[in-house]
Image (cartoon, rainbow, N blue to C red):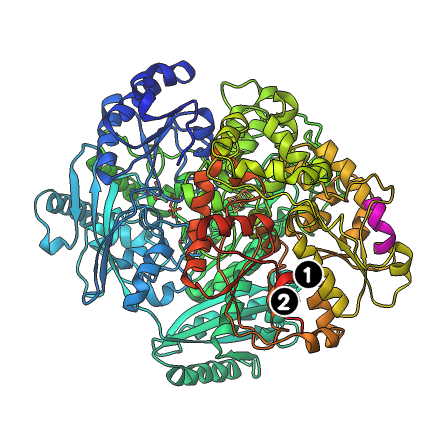
Amino acid sequence: MNAPLPLKVTRDVAARAYDFVAKVSNEVAGKLAARLAEETQGEVLFSNADKGRYATDASIYQVMPVGVFVPRTSDEVKTALAICRDLNVPIVARGGGTSQCGQTVGAGLVIDHAKYVRNILNVDVEQRTAEVEPGIVLDHLNAALKKHGLWFPVDVSTSAQATLGGMAGNNSCGSRSIAYGNMVHNVLGLTAWRSDGGLLELGRMDAASGEARALGSYVKTLSDALLPELVAHWPKVMRRVAGYNLDIFNNQSEKPYTQDGSVNLAHLLVGSEGTLALTKSLKLRLAELPRSKVLGVVNFPTFYKAMDAAQHIVKIGDGTLTAVELVDRTMIELSLQNPVFAATVRSALIGQPEAILLVEFSGASKTELIPKIKQLVELMGELGLPGSVVEMIDDAAQKNLWEVRKAGLNIMMSLKGDGKPVSFIEDCAVPLEHLAEYTSALTEVFRKHGSKGTWYAHASVGTLHVRPILDMRREGAAKMRAIAEEASALVRHYKGAYSGEHGDGLCRGEWIGWQFGPKITQAFAQIKHHLDPLNLLSPQRMIDPPKMDDTTLMRFPPNYKVIPIKTALDWSAWNVQNNPVTEQTSTPGSGGDPANGFAKAVEMCNNNGHCRKFDAGTMCPSYRVTRDEKHLTRGRANTLRLALSGQLQGIKAEDAFTSEAVKDALDLCVGCKGCKRDCPTGVDMAKMKIEFLHHYKGKHGYTFKDKLIAYLPDYAPWASRFAPLLNLRDKLPGLAFLSEKLIGLSARRTLPQWKTKTFFNTPQATATRSEVLAATKPVVLFVDTFNGYFESENASAALKVLQAAGYTVHIASKAQPDGKSLCCGRTYLASGMVDKAKTKAREMVDALAPFAEKGIAIVGLEPSCLLTLRDEMLVMGLGAAAQTINGHALLLEEFLAREATAGKLGALKAALKPITQPILLHGHCHQKAFGAVSPIMDVLKLIPGAQPELIESSCCGMAGSFGYEASHYEVSMQMAELSLLPAVRQQPDAVVLADGTSCRHQIKDGAQREAIHVAVLLARQLR
Ligand SMILES: Cc1cc2nc3c(=O)[nH]c(=O)nc-3n(C[C@H](O)[C@H](O)[C@H](O)COP(=O)(O)OP(=O)(O)OC[C@H]3O[C@@H](n4cnc5c(N)ncnc54)[C@H](O)[C@@H]3O)c2cc1C
Ligand code: SF4
Ligand code: SF4
């Protein structure tokens, strides 16, 4: 599936791998790549772009690895280890790379376990255990366990990305850790490769033998000798994840490692962050899936009161309490500003609270749990807050509120400008009785340093997340140090743990000595030396770590520079700076970006890895089928960032942006805009690809295929006259083959069929410009090239429906007629011809502005065309008129849904016949990106008896011309097979609806079913 890259060492070049890599890297790297390629079947990624993509994680750090290895089996990890041992190359183990402290960045061979080493080895339903390989993602494991009524309950927020190996590496903790504990409390056994190649098999100490027993005895001796030190220095809170778990023999935590007091040697490796051994498999303790949940939302007049109440709340519930999560005023405000979440948040509020706590109880039934909510109500009365609890019994309401809690963080992370919320003290854990004082004092520290923090998350266990806003390119590192020093003093004062959830890595390594004192730190070094005497595994991390504020290790060091670029699109909205206290941003264009805001838009990616997901939403289809970091929104953003800042080694800085390395990374981006909506920080890769193509094609030239696709709207009027001739391509044997060879259009595809009789050359009974401007129920129908020339029946159906609903319909046409139809410029944009697209867009503006200015809706049918008016046309320098049109451009279903809500569709409703056939709907990605799918569902419900079902799908894979191209055919079909085509096949009797012309084509090609536009179904149902 992976397109070959110059320095991706594929099988065929394995023999030449040494020369290949050594030329641009160094001799050791060359030997390493050559041997990996020879001795394994794994992916050997040594190009500078690949290394750059693995140089970062969700932290502020960046360190170039020597190379990247993606093993196909766990035995290949062992082989890689042996090669690294021979060559003395360090190893950095990696899962999803979502660590926040720099655990997965380092100057060694990065071994990515997430792509292939992800099997479930065994599930024992009776014993409630599962054995898994380290690369499996938590959500995927839980999806497989669901049918048994079980789950692995360490529910980290990154459950859709985090691998079990990574979770064990970091000793991760979920929102419900008060009930289920941390990772360490749920690991029963572990096998791992030592750096000498031996396999450690770790489980209960009392059953251990051989090497495991020897290891246990060694650590026990250390632990026993240090008992007074442990008692004096070891934090007693459950949320302590720093250092190695030396206290397994002398438990210091408020929650012991095991329920029966036994010692489990696997726990030694949990939280060791890949520094002791490489996990091969994990045996996990599973829990019963909670059958019922209820939520009490407590409203507090002050933040302090909320923090103070947590210590009392955790004592209620008789074992059913599973979460106490904080949402503070800033997050409440942010969520209230979001139209999607406002209603849900309001339903949880009583007045204007300064903070709310989400208190969850889980158990066998609601009946059992409702009294627990009553307990909560009583408790709040006793604490002087009667009437402060909103009771949420309904599952849907609870789910919506949890979504808001997550989204609040996302909105916070989307702050534009160089100041960003930085994670470095965001998981200090303090005993609950001190939580109120601790948070107040730390807020004061932020204020003193000219910053501000928003508080959220795990009040139940004293681990509140908070990220002060810092500008890491300027004074951020110094401020970070100063704040960390003061925070650590507070943590010590309140006897807490400095590292309470996210691990040590580069950010907190230096604080291990501070937390535990020299003797325990020395014991950690001895454990490291005992297990990894060669110091091969993530050296200089937990032992001898660098300073947290070493700017040479940072993604944005003080010498970070952006190469000037004259952009084709307007990126000035990103070219701003912000005030860390008020979060106000400066005027667009004032941010000082030499790339006119484009670089700052790219830098919005903070590497959180949210795009590595397979669940709901669209982002990111090319990753979903390839599982490659390169074909992931994050990988693309990193590639662009490295290019724009001249960090793609081996490529001249001024050539980097238009290099093949960037082209390769963007090649499989289908421009679905999934990331625009789903990425927490709004990274809009589809738009970035347009900007890139403009520069790349401008330099390297357009192919015939580019021109054939881009100029389609221009030649469509005359091409339609030669329809029978042009359609021969799909009829005469050999022509499709020829079109693949000569042009690059896949022979396995049919092409859209030209028609001689089109919507545009058929007389229509429609209103003139002046008639629609004077009408009482006016609407302007924008018929795009695809629906006008290839699928005229859609345009005719839309016209019929609008007229049946009583509207005076005008078909949009050019202000200066030239025989061609109006065009939004989409095909030009997709080919990178931004200047040509601007010409088209200007014609659109001239034609449509008079209607928009009068408040008349401009209705379109093809999502990718109509939504261009609401997206790209706003960044083409078209002035205020484009903004006005943006406010009135609607898809047919959006218009009808709006009018139905306003009670204007009585006539249409009365005219619709009932339907009995099932209806399956596939939303176009751009509809999803603009939240325009639910209006289709609303409109379909106007048809009596209609019970539409939405297919939970990502991009159909056709994406304009993408799927027609021979080089993309396979990927395109795989995208369609992810969920769309199986869903269509599963319901052979259903009417399949798809508003996108490419989606319909894909469904026809892949499932041999005729999908139709919603307009056609509505028209069919007219009496
Ligand atoms: C937005 C956001 C929210 C988060 N929320 C939470 C949260 O709720 N709770 C929480 O605990 N954390 C959270 N994290 C941190 C992070 O997601 C978790 O620590 C997660 O479990 C890491 O999983 P991963 O697969 O990405 O691991 P990685 O980051 O890839 O690796 C984590 C560690 O494990 C090591 N490792 C990986 N594979 C192996 C192996 N096979 N053998 C040995 N070592 C290995 C790595 O070297 C590294 O030290 C969050 C992070 C982000 C960005
Ligand atoms: S592209 Fe968005 S979702 Fe992906 S890592 Fe970057 S910020 Fe996160
Ligand atoms: S536009 Fe679509 S394919 Fe491209 S990066 Fe974003 S989500 Fe992925």
Q: Position of residue 223 (x, y in %)?
A: 21, 49
Q: Position of residue 859 (x, y in %)?
A: 74, 57
Asked if residue 741 lies left or right of residue 180, the reply is right
Asked if residue 122 lies left or right of residue 101, the reply is left
Q: Are marks 1 and 2 in contact (CB under 8 Å)?
A: yes
Q: Secondary structure at mark 2?
A: helix
Q: Which residue is mark 1?
A: 797
Q: Which residues are magenta?
A: 845-851
Question: Main SS of the magenta segment?
Answer: helix
Q: Tell me which residue sits at (72%, 64%) in the image.
A: 800
Q: Position of residue 421 (x, y in %)?
A: 57, 47
Q: Nearer the viewer, residue 294 or 659?
A: 659
| Amino acid at the residue labelled 2 | Arg
Q: Nearer the viewer, residue 992 or 470?
A: 992
Q: Tell me which residue sits at (78%, 39%) in the image.
A: 877
Q: Which residue is mark 2?
A: 1020
How many other residues sit within 10 Å of disc 2, few (<14), some (14-19) or many (≥20)?
some
